[in-house]
């Protein structure tokens, strides 16, 4: 799972305004710079002070009671799966109350990240979207750890263990990059049954062990060709392909061009 930046606003109020009640389609972070900030979230009245953060989730009904002199940052984002086809992990429990979506602690220091998001939005440079996603990721995890554990979805609470398991399996694949192991051999290295190992790879990486290992080999091949200047034959032999033709065909299928063009 990864947060993907959508847009950013810094709202400075001059006068009072009731923003119409609306339903959110994605996540919204509201960080209060100068409060108090008041709103209605899912029919519950909420007040936030300076430095507090409210995390609004998809499906929430929200109405702002904006007052003269207040100022707050707004960031919209969505949560994307770790790989295509994977389910998106929900952040909150389905029955969470609006007041439980207030993050514990003071997030005044996070205004630096928001300022950088604003700068990149104005700059509009070549890699600004990538920089914004990176800044948002840091902001998201800083805020998420301030949410009470009881309000988080079960899948989200399990994410740390999922990350550990993913890293363990990736290390196993790395140990076998230069060979052509069977699923039985990979599963034995992971101390799992072949069936469980195959199901785990599908759930965590979106494909079976053979496909995962091949994709990792081809990423390593790309690095060897570009950065180390090795020949197609050298890379093919080093990564355990049957011959350079087999390697070139697999490489082109994944990367869209033969390895000789790198």
Image (tube, grey):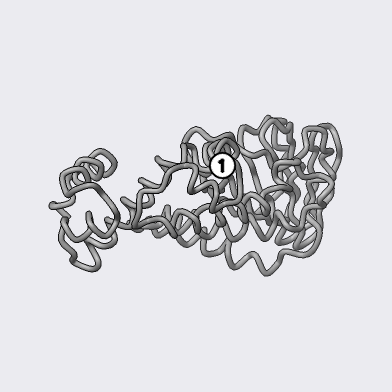
Rendered residue at 64%/39% (across/down): 89
Image position of 50 (left or right of 186): right
**Front-lying residue, 181 or 66:** 181
Label 1 crowd bin: few (<14), some (14–19), many (20+), radius 10 Å = many
**Front-lying residue, 116 or 247:** 247
- Residue 12 at x, y = what percent? 64, 55
Q: Is there any visible trace of residue 237 in the rendered image?
A: yes
- Residue 198 at x, y = what percent? 53, 38
Image quarter of residue 236: bottom left
Quadrant position of the N terminus in the picture: top right
**Front-lying residue, 110 or 65:** 110
Give SS at disc 1. helix
- Residue 238 at x, y = what percent? 26, 60
Q: Is there any visible trace of residue 69 in the rendered image?
A: no
Give the total number of marks visible in the rendering: 1
- Residue 202 at x, y = what percent? 52, 37
Q: Is residue 19 above or below residue 146?
A: above
Q: Is residue 195 above or below residue 261?
A: above
Quadrant position of the C terminus in the picture: bottom left
Rendered residue at 41%/41% (across/down): 210
Label 1: which residue? 197
Rendered residue at 60%/41% (across/down): 193
**Front-lying residue, 237 or 258:** 237
């Amino acid at each position: 799972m990864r947060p993907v930046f959508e847009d950013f606003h810094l709202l400075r109020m001059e006068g009072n305004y009731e923003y119409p009640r609306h339903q959110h389609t994605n996540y919204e972070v509201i960080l209060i710079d100068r409060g108090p900030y008041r709103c209605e979230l899912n029919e519950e009245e909420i007040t936030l002070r300076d430095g507090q953060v409210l995390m609004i989730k998809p499906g929430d009904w929200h109405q702002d009671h904006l007052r003269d002199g207040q100022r707050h940052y707004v960031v919209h984002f969505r949560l994307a799966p770790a790989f295509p086809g994977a389910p998106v992990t929900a952040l909150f429990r389905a029955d969470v109350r609006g007041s439980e979506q207030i993050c514990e602690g003071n997030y005044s220091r996070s205004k630096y990240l928001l300022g950088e998001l604003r700068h990149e939005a104005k700059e509009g440079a070549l890699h600004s979207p990538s920089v914004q996603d990176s800044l948002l990721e840091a902001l998201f995890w800083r805020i998420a750890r301030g949410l009470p554990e009881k309000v988080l979805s079960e899948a989200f609470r399990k994410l740390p263990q999922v990350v550990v398991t993913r890293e363990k399996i990736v290390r196993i694949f790395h140990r076998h990059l230069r060979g052509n192991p069977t699923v039985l051999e990979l599963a034995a290295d992971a101390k799992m049954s072949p069936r469980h190992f195959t199901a785990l790879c599908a759930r965590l990486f979106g494909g079976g062990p053979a496909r995962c290992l091949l994709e990792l080999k081809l990423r390593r091949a790309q690095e060897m060709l570009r950065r180390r200047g090795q020949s197609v034959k050298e890379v093919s032999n080093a990564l355990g392909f049957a011959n350079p033709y087999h390697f070139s065909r697999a490489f082109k299928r994944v990367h869209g061009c033969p390895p000789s063009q790198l």
